[in-house]
Amino acid sequence: MKSDNFILKLCLMGEGGVGKTTLSNRILTGLFNPATKMTIGIDFHLYRVEILDPLSESENKKVKLDIQIWDFGGENRFRFLLPQFVKGATGGLLLYDLMRFSTQKYLKEWMDIWEKNSDVGAPIYLIGAKFDSIHEKQLDSINQEIKEIAESLGIKKYFLISSKTGYSIEAMLDSICKEMYIFKISKSK
């Protein structure tokens, strides 16, 4: 019996320069591109993936997903576009740069856009990007920081990632894809 393909919409949000486009490129190609240019408005990509079906009683049943990746430009001048493009999202990744404290400043504003325009219950993760820039002695404080930020925003899951090294990208992607799939199935019932 042939598996159905499920279409899911994943929004990448956060201030300019936090690594949304670099993450998108890493997901799509598996490579790091240091010459990424600023996103003007919104970029859209399609990513096909096969995951183990989290709703199946069979341990090896797979499901095919077509993930629409919506990479939102982080500059303030593009924000008026975002509410209409968040609609229908089945998942979101809210990024900030671990090395630039200023990128945390507007996380609440991004979260407000998400909460006002996405469907209730759509999963969103907080992503601390550019983990490769962190010194080992900063790790405890960085872990505590992301946990506190996630709690203050009401976000249940968070990841520290590096698009440069690939650190934690696969685990984060597998997790959000499974949650988006579960959300889509539950919404269609």
Image (tube, rainbow, N blue to C red):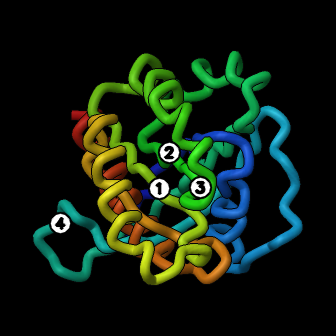
17, above or below 48, in the image? above
- Residue under circle 3? 97
Mark 3 vs mark 4: give the one in front.
3
149, above or below 65, in the image? above
**Mark 2: which amino acid?**
Leu
Position of residue 89 measured from the top left corner of the image (x, y, whole percent): 48, 35
* Mark with earlier residue (1, 2): 2
Disc 1: CA contacts within 10 A as few (<14), some (14-19) or many (>=20): many
Q: How many numbered dots are placed on residues in this image?
A: 4
For mark 1, give the secondary structure.
Answer: strand
- Residue under circle 4? 56
Label 4 and label 2: CA atoms lie apart by 29 Å
- Residue under circle 2? 94
**Mark 4: which amino acid?**
Ser
Q: Nearer the viewer, residue 78 or 42?
A: 78
Label 1 and label 2: CA atoms lie apart by 6 Å
Which image quadrant: the N terminus? Answer: bottom left
Disc 2: CA contacts within 10 A as few (<14), some (14-19) or many (>=20): many
Label 1 and label 4: CA atoms lie apart by 28 Å
**Mark 1: which amino acid?**
Ile
24, above or below 50, in the image? above
Label 3 and label 1: CA atoms lie apart by 9 Å
- Residue under circle 1? 127
Label 3 and label 2: CA atoms lie apart by 11 Å
Q: Is residue 1 visible?
A: no
Badge 3 vs badge 2, beta-carbon distance below 8 Å: no
Q: Quadrant of residue 83?
A: top right
For mark 2, give the secondary structure.
Answer: strand
